[in-house]
Amino acid sequence: AEGVPLSDDGVVVLRLTRRARSSQVARVLSGSPLLAACHARVAEAGGSPWSAAWLFVPITEEQIREAGIELSDHHILCLRSDIESIRAALKEIRRAHRPGLAGATGHDSLDNGDEEGIVDVEVENFCTLRTF
């Protein structure tokens, strides 16, 4: 199953369920080669770090406000197509220290059944975003 996107571009908000502030999570989300395309997308659009959340799509504070979303350091804003890369990158962290990814709504788990340490991903927010 796939989550419901926030926009026609497939933008979704994910939530880290534990260890969101760990240095291992920060290292993986900021430096994993698996997420290079996510970082390049934001850099090419001239993105700036205005939010504590992990922003893997270029978006402004105004767009987030218009959508009625509150982002925190345990959120990841990404394209639905990025979810597999994020899941794979987080698997670089030892299972005992790995964060979970979940959605507050409990809809549409994207678990692929990987027995070596599942990283569940669910979409937290369902609303419309006006994107670039």
Image (cartoon, rainbow, N blue to C red):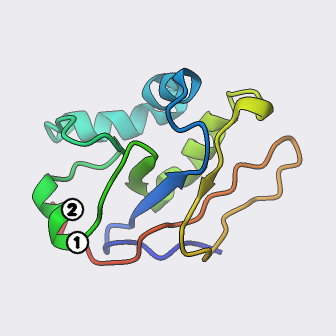
Which amino acid, mark 2? Ile
**Of all residues shown, which one is farthest toward the right?**
115
Mark 1: few/some/many CA within 10 Å (<14, 14-19, 20+): some
Mark 2: few/some/many CA within 10 Å (<14, 14-19, 20+): some
* Label 1, label 2: how far apart the Cα atoms are: 5 Å
Q: Nearer the viewer, residue 12 or 8?
A: 12
Q: Is residue 7 left or right of residue 86?
A: left
User: Residue sitting at 48 percent across and 27 percent down?
Assistant: 26
User: Residue sitting at 10 percent across and 60 percent down?
Assistant: 62
Quadrant location of the N terminus in the rendered image: bottom right
Residue 44, by quadrant, is: top left
Q: What secondary structure is marked by label 1?
A: helix
Q: What secondary structure is marked by label 2?
A: helix
User: Residue sitting at 30 percent across and 49 percent down?
Assistant: 57
Q: Is residue 97 left or right of residue 4?
A: right
Residue that carries the numbered disc 2 in the rendered image: 64
Residue 22 numbered mark, or none: none
Q: Nearer the viewer, residue 85 or 74?
A: 74
Where does the image place residue 121, in percent across and percent down from the top left?
62, 58
Does residue 125 lie above or below 58 as drawn? below
Residue 67 numbered mark, or none: 1
Where does the image place residue 9, in percent across and percent down from the top left?
32, 67
Where does the image place residue 126, in percent across and percent down from the top left?
40, 76
Which amino acid, mark 1? Ala
Where does the image place residue 99, in percent across and percent down from the top left?
64, 41
Q: Is residue 1 left or right of residue 67?
A: right
Residue 47, by quadrant, is: top left
Contact? badges 1 and 2 (CB < 8 Å): yes
**Of all residues shown, which one is farthest toward the left?**
62
